[in-house]
Amino acid sequence: MVLDRLCENDPDESHKLLTRKLPTWHEQDLFSLAKDVGQGDFVNNKCCQTKLDKIWLGETGPTTRVFTVSADLFLIVS
């Protein structure tokens, strides 16, 4: 619910948070963490889906590691 609320109020900032490297978690982003702990349902969140759409369509910022996110998502889904 927190991610939903953030995405409603500030979608750009929430999308940045999804792909931000987290020093505490060995420079992983939230997509990588979701994969590592088996939380494929996390990716079904509307906010995640809109960010993934942007990645898929090439509308990502310079800080988004497209290959890494794509590889992580493949592992989540499979």
Image (cartoon, helix red, strand yellow):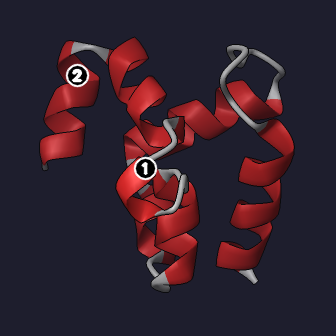
Residue 11 at x, y percent in the picture = 36, 18
Which image quadrant for residue 46? Answer: top left
Identity of the residue drawn at 51% across and 42% down: 21
Amino acid at pointer 1: Pro
Q: Which mark is residue 14?
A: none
Q: Seen in the image, is 9 located left or right of residue 23? A: left
Q: Residues within 10 Å of mark 2 (few under 14, many from 20)?
A: few
Q: Seen in the image, is 27 located left or right of residue 2? A: right
Q: Nearer the viewer, mark 2 or mark 1?
A: 1
Residue 35 at x, y percent in the picture = 57, 74
User: Alpha carbon of mark 2 to alpha carbon of mark 1: how far?
Assistant: 26 Å
Q: Which mark is residue 8?
A: 2
Which image quadrant for residue 9? Answer: top left
Identity of the residue drawn at 22% across and 39% down: 4
Q: Earlier in the sequence, mark 2 or mark 1?
A: 2
Q: Name the residue beneath numbered marker 1.
A: 23
Amino acid at pointer 2: Glu
Residue 26 at x, y percent in the picture = 51, 62
Q: Nearer the viewer, residue 41 or 62?
A: 62
